[in-house]
Image (tube, grey):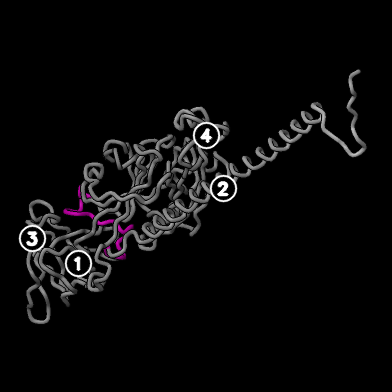
Amino acid sequence: MRARRSRGGGESGVTIVELMVAMVLAAMLAAGLFALLTGQQRTYSQQMEGTGIQQNLGGAVEYLERQVRLAGFGLGGPCPGSVLLSGTATGAATLPSVTLYNACNLLTQNPTACCSSANLGACSATMSTTAVDSLSVTYAGDVNNPALFGGIRLTRALGATDQVVWTGASGGMVANGRFMLWEPGTTTPCILRQLTANPVAAGAEFQIAHGASAALNGGGGTNQAFPVGSLLFPVAATTRPRHFAIDTTTSPPQLVTWSTTAANPSTDRANREVLAEGVESLQVAYACDVGDSGGVGAGDGQLAEGSTVAERRVDEWAFNVAGETYRPNCSVRPIRAVRLTLIGRGASGDPRDRVGRRPAHEDQPEGTAAADRAESHSGSFQREVLSVQVRPRNIL
C-alpha cells in the first residue's frame, strides 16, 4: 500500500499560476515606473538643453546690444548719421556707424555682390528670403583717449584746394592722424581726412596740413570747402568695422565676430571669434522715423510698426515681414532703432519630436520639419528665440 502525504495544518505554498500572475503584475509595475522615469529624464534633458540655449543666446544678445549701442562712438559725434566720407565729398567710400545686411552672410559673401540695393546703413539682396542676416558696427577704437572726442572750430575758412586748416588749438592732432570735418546746420557730408605733417604753431594758432598724398584725402588734392566755424574732430586710427555673422559650416552653427578694414569682410577672417554655439540664424530689422516730410532727422518721434502683414509692408520698419517691398528712406533720416533676433537650437535632434522646426521671424519664413529632420539625421531640434531692440546713441 502506498503512503499518502498530506499537508499539516501549518503548511502553505504558491502555485505556478499564482507565481506567474505575481510576476506579470511586477513586470507591469516595473514597466510603468521605467516609463515614468524615462519621461522625467527626457523632460529634464530637454529643460537643461533649453536652458543652455537660452544662456548662449542671452550672452550673445547682450554683447550685440552693447556693440550696436556703441556704434558711431568717436566718429565725429554730431556728424549726421555718424557716416564719414573718406576722400572727396562725391563718390567717396563711406564709414557708417552701423550697417545692416539683409540676406547677406558677410562670412562667405561679398556685400557688393549680394546687395542689389543700398541705403544709408542698410543693404538688401531681397526682402523675402530664408538666408541669415549680418551686421557691422564701427566706432573709434581708442576710447580711453579723451583728446579724440573734443571738437575744434575752424578760425579760418578752408577752401576747396587749400592744404592748411587753421584752428585755435591743436586738439590732440598728430602726424598721420585722422580727423573729420563737418559744417553744422547743413547737409554737407562729413569728410574724413588724414594729416600729412605735425601741427605747426603760427602765433596763437595751429596750421594742420592735409595734403593730397594722404590715403584718405582723395586724388588731385581737391577737398571740400568748409567755412569759418566748421567743426574738426580727431578720429581714432584704430577705427575699423566689426562684423557679426552666422557660421553655417559648423554643426551646430555658430555666431561669430571679426574685425577688418577689407571692403569684402569674407576675405579677411583671421581674427574670427566665436560668440555663441548653436545659433542658427541672425535676423535684423531696423526703423527710421519718417513720420512727416521734414528735413534731415525730422519725424514725429514714433517708430510705428503695423500689426498685420499688409501694415508691416508700409510701416517705418524694414526687413520685419516676408515679402516686404517698402523700405524707409534712411538716406535722409538715419536708423533710429535696430531689432536683433537670434534663433538658437540644440546640438542634436530628438527622434521622438516630429513637429519642431525653425520658427518664422522678421522676414525669414518658417522652416520645414522635413528639412529639420534631414539636417539632424533623426528628429527635430529644440529651439529658442531671443530678441532685443536697440536705439544707437551716436546716430543723429
Q: Is residue 111 visible?
A: yes
The amino acid marked with disc number 2 is Gln
Residue 158: image tag: none
Q: Is residue 185 visible?
A: no
Depth check, mark 1 against mark 3: the one in front is 3
How far apart, in angstroms, are the residues tagged by discs 1 and 2?
A: 64 Å
x, y percent for residue 132: 40, 40
The amino acid marked with disc number 3 is Gly
Tell me, yes or no, whether the highlighted magenta stretch contains residue 122.
no
* Precedes in sequence: disc 1 or disc 4: 1
Tell me, yes or no, whether the highlighted magenta stretch contains residue 78.
yes
Relative placement, left or right, of 396 versus 140 is right
Residue at mark 1: 227
Q: Residue at x 29, y 38 (%)?
A: 108
Local crowd size for mark 4, using a 10 Å CA cut-off: few (<14), some (14–19), many (≥20) = many
Residue at mark 4: 380
* Placement of 21 over or under 329, stated as above or below: above
Q: Characterize the magenta stretch by its predominant secondary structure.
A: loop
Relative placement, left or right, of 298 versus 264 is right
Q: Which residues are magenta?
A: 75-93
* Precedes in sequence: disc 3 or disc 4: 3
Depth check, mark 3 against mark 4: the one in front is 4
